[in-house]
Amino acid sequence: MRVLLVVNPHARRGRVLGDDVRRRLALHGVETVETASSPQGLDAIVVAGGDGTFARAIGRGLTLGLPMGLVPLGTFNDLARTLDIPADIDGACATIAQRRTRAIDVARVNSAYYVSEASIGVSSRLTRLQKTRDKQRFGLLAVLASALAAVKYLQPFHAEVAYEDARVNLRTVQLTIANSNHFGGVITVEGAAVDDGWLDLYSVEIDGPRSVLALMSAVLAGRPRAAQNVRTIRSAAFSVSTRRPRAIVADGEPAGKTPARFELIRGALRVFAPDGAPSD
């Protein structure tokens, strides 16, 4: 098995553990190359990094028509949680070597692909406040510190959302368009999946400290849909416009600004996963 290996040196553990990933893959019979202009001679693309690194490589995977593997080296590793990919390097490499794949949906906004979620509002501000060097050194603590700094930007904004034959006006502090049941590092949603053919829009409509506490309780309980101040809409595509352009972040990476269209490509990407079917 021969793969194109994409290692993110800026991921929290990428620079330190990149050589270990190469060694572990080799032990499992996987040959790695790190430059390739065509799919000839390649069996897959393997990403060693976090969700953002994987998202940046999706376009290449779709263009080359190759399955993708993931060795999770990021802070949250939402996709690895979604696919039950082992958190340890050897386990993740063994999963790739087994060549069992499953097809998942891919979402796209402003020509940027993602698999977990895209957001407008306070979370995009949070992403801009995070510093790569702090995440490398402090991990989750650095993210929590950025979250506290982002609280002062918790200001509602107006958004118009169009989907199917409907249109709705929202006053929200956060819009999330999710493709998965795991996102944001701590959020798990029942009744959603990365291969269900749907995008789920969540509008967080905070109106005071009590609603913040209610939302946090629902999130920690794994039931964000049940929070009274969270509006949810399910569709295969959304068009979002705001009174002024607002930044969009997709799987932790900048993805342009509003107005924007979020759309789903069903079953577009094959990924290596423990519960996948044997590949050719």
Image (cartoon, rainbow, N blue to C red):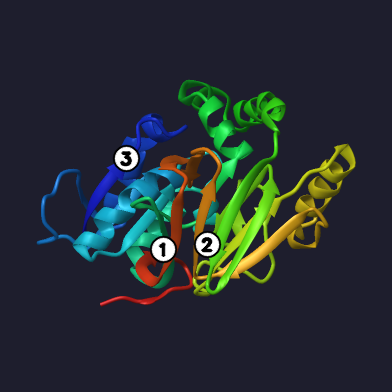
Quadrant of the rendered image containing residue 148: top right
Please report the residue visible at 41 percent of the width from the left and 62 percent of the height from the top: 95
Q: Residue furthest right?
A: 210
> Who comes first in sequence, dot 3 or dot 2?
3
Dot 2 corresponds to which residue? 179
Q: Indicate the amino acid at tag 3.
A: Val
Question: Quadrant location of the C terminus?
Answer: bottom left
Please report the residue visible at 67 percent of the width from the left and 29 percent of the height from the top: 153
| Number of the label disc, if any, that sits on residue 7 | 3
Q: CA distance from mark 1 to mark 2?
A: 7 Å
Q: Indicate the amino acid at tag 2.
A: Asn
Left or right: 152 as drawn, with respect to 211: left
Dot 1 corresponds to which residue? 106
Residue 174 place in picture, x, y as percent? 65, 45
Residue 86 seen from this side: no
Callout 1–callout 2 Cβ contact below 8 Å: yes
